[in-house]
Amino acid sequence: MSQRTAAGAGAFTGAQSTGRRNGSPPPRLAGGDERLSLTDGAAPCGGPEGSEVPITVTDNGFLRGRLLLVAFEGWNDAGEAATGALKVLKEQLDVIVISEVDAEEYFDFQFNRPNVVVDDDGKRVLEWPGATFSGPDVTAGDRSDGSNVYLLIGSEPSRNWRSFTAEVMNTVLAEEITGIVLLGAMLADVPHTRPISVFSTSENPLVRSELDIERSTYEGPVGILSVIADAAESAGVPTVSIWASVPHYVHNAPSPKATLALVEKIEELIGLPIERGELIDESTAWESGIDALAGEDDDMAAYIRQLEQARDTVDSPEASGEAIAQEFERYLRKRGDGGRGDGRAGGDGRPDEPWRRD
């Protein structure tokens, strides 16, 4: 692990300097503080207490500035779809490591255990959980594709989320990033046989207007993505959240179909062609494999048909709000869970097999 920089405990350690690579100082937050602090005693939204941090969009719009795409393994990453999508993108971009988080400060290694792997030289090495901030190689000359795209990929930290977020924001400000796209994937009552639902939201009214998206109405527990989004908006860096819905009854395996859906959404958003590679074939094989399992289990097949009926009703052009609500209520009654909405099965069904009940 690289040494801490002179910026101290509030900065990413780096394969390169954590400051601006052109030697200029980081931009200042409103209120005069150069560094964002979310440690104990700091303002809840991330800025210095009492300061007024503007929420702005670059003059050329959200998509034309420097964009950071973020994904974390764990609670925010059902089917490994979000991190899988960014790994596909990373393989095609000319990016270098800007900085890495000090894993000792943020990870419980009994929960996020290191992995032993065999490297290209045939040696067994340990890979530790962490987070890596990558960006364009400024020494590579002029490039027309991906030169404004930065990536943050890692594991969701186990502790000290506010300090972790402060480190992220220090690098965001030092690299003069103007917008953040946060990718996630969640388990949902959706059928694997239909297109993966992907939805985008933003807390920034200017971004919502520019991209024609809605504001999230969700209330409840959140992951590190929401904490970073809150800090970024408070620091004047607008954000967009993009989430894919993964069928919850196949949650134990990676979902290449959800990864593909997020890759397509990223391509649409940033206007950068992304090669699909083997993702299309893997998605087809994933769907066929689940079809085969359902073909051997009548209860599972019937449950999937219920999900398909509910999805088709919502997607139909003539569907009204009342019709959608009625279909959803019928679906809940068929599930037998009384509409409690916690994802658990009724009767004797296990959480991962909700179609099994008396």
Image (cartoon, rainbow, N blue to C red):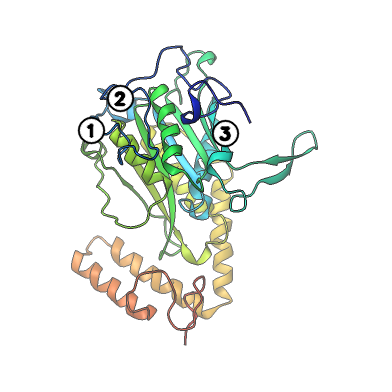
What residue sits 41% from the left and 12% below the top?
24
Which residue in the structure is indicated by mark 3?
91
Label 3, label 1: how far apart the Cα atoms are: 43 Å
- Residues at marks 2 and 3 touching, judged by CB atoms closer than 8 Å: no
Give the side of residue 325 with respect to residue 143, left or right.
left
Residue 235 image point, x, y percent: 30, 31
Q: Please rate how many residues cluster around mark 1, counting C-alpha atoms within 10 Å: few if below 14, some from 14 to 19, many from 20.
A: few
Residue type marked 2: Leu
**Residue 172 or residue 260, whichever sits in front:** 172
In this rendering, is residue 128 above or below 295?
above
Residue type marked 1: Gly
What residue sits 29% from the left and 71% below the top?
328
* Residue 186 numbered tag: none
Mark 2 residue element: loop
Q: Please rate how many residues cluster around mark 2, counting C-alpha atoms within 10 Å: few if below 14, some from 14 to 19, many from 20.
A: many
- Can residue 275 be spotted in the picture? no
- Which residue extends farthest bottom? 358
What residue sits 54% from the left and 15% below the top?
140
Q: From the viewer's perspective, is the residue at label 3 or at label 1 nearer?
A: 1
* Residue 50 numbered tag: 1
**Residue 99 or residue 351, whichever sits in front:** 99
Earlier-in-chain disc, 3 versus 1: 1
Q: Please rate how many residues cluster around mark 3, counting C-alpha atoms within 10 Å: few if below 14, some from 14 to 19, many from 20.
A: few
Q: Looking at the rendering, which quadrant does residue 343 occupy?
A: bottom left
